[in-house]
Amino acid sequence: MAKTQKIYDSNGTAVWAGIRDLNDKSDKPYDTLLETDRLDGRTVLITGASSGLGLAVSENLASRGARVLMVCRREAVRELNSVRAAGAPYGGTAEILRADMTDFATIRRLIDDLAERRERIDVAISNAAVVCNAARRTTDGFEEMLQVNALAPAVLLKGLLERGVIPNDGFSGNGRDSAALPASAPLPRIVVVASEAHRSAKTLNLQDLRKIEPYGMSDSTARYGWTKLLLLTFTRELGRRLTDVSVHALCPGPVNSNIAREAPAIVRPFAKLFFTLFFQPPEKAAFPVVYLAASPRIEGRNAGYQFLMRRRPPSEAADSAENGHLLWDTLDELLD
């Protein structure tokens, strides 16, 4: 495991590690996504839905009959129309919901609106993420990459659970035990897009959540890995606290998306060519995300953590129940 952690410590080694893992033919997938894995009549909420992986997942979900709630910072009319077009022949629909992961007030407003509409989310996908080239303070007083990648998903998912928008018994008392959710209905699912980069961070460093220290592009991968460790640790703890919601986490592998859009201008043309040649297109990278959202073969159980379609144990730090409990209590104090 130590070797795996080291290879994600810098931008260059992280890229090569991702390519190596993507092309590792010795680690066979444990299942596959089928055309018959459908979401007809089910509502799926996904963050970061206006570009890259999030847009590709949204289009795939709509083509499987889902009603897709696309959480975006902007109006994203062109992207919305693209998802609607993908779903139209199959009964899938789409709607834009506005929220900015750098502003907790917009996330809480979204939760309130969904609760007032009496929405029931069958599948919630936390996908939004960013890689910043420098530290920036959000309106909530946190460093931007930390807030978008780790804190905002916690605020959103806990809020949806506490308001019963994701039906459950542990937080809101409107799951199967209350008979509000029919016994025959599939259990709600939470799917969190994490990253193998979480292995580069060995400790949670919870004392640093309020700190905003300068960093540059050369330090961005290490910073990103830390935020993904926090996210995966939170996700694992959430899975331990929920008995009637399936909680899944995955790394989709290297994706040719715009997550590295803040790279220096002189580097961007080369990065774009490199990503196109060696990284997965978003349409292919979407498959493991959609699998966890739609496959009936994992019904009623947590799939743990997976890389692509390969089961992998998360790092010891992410999987630690002690770390999960400590992080949960820290976030309660920090974010409520």
Image (spheres, rainbow, N blue to C red):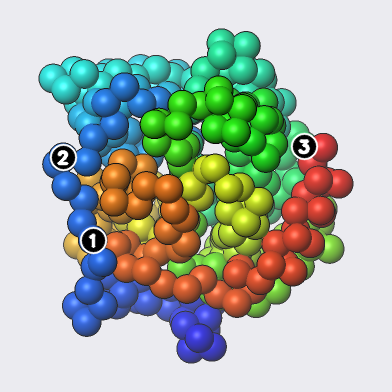
Left or right, residue 18 beside residue 274: right
Tell me which numbered mark, 3 or 2, is placed earlier along the sequence: 2
Which residue is the extreme one toward the bottom?
3
**In this rendering, is residue 283 above or below 77?**
below
Q: Quadrant of residue 32?
A: bottom left
Q: Is residue 274 visible?
A: no
Q: Quadrant of residue 236?
A: bottom right
Tell me which numbered mark, 2 or 1, is placed earlier along the sequence: 1
Residue depth check, mark 3 versus mark 1: number of the one nearer the observer: 1
Which residue is the extreme one toward the top?
117
Q: Amino acid at mark 3?
A: Asp
Give the structural element (helix, strand or loop) at label 1: loop
Give the structural element (helix, strand or loop) at label 2: loop
**In this rendering, is residue 255 above or below 173?**
below
* Image coords of residue 56 (percent x, y): 28, 39
Q: Quadrant of residue 223?
A: bottom right
Q: Residue at x 23, y 61 (%)?
A: 31
Left or right, residue 264 beside residue 257: right
* Depth check, front residue: 263 or 61: 61
- Label 2 packing within 10 angstroms: few (<14), some (14-19), many (20+): few
Find residue 31 and name its label: 1
- Label 3 packing within 10 angstroms: few (<14), some (14-19), many (20+): few
Label 3 – label 2 distance at C-alpha: 43 Å
* Image coords of residue 139 (percent x, y): 75, 34
Q: Which residue is mark 2?
A: 36
Find residue 140 and name its label: 3
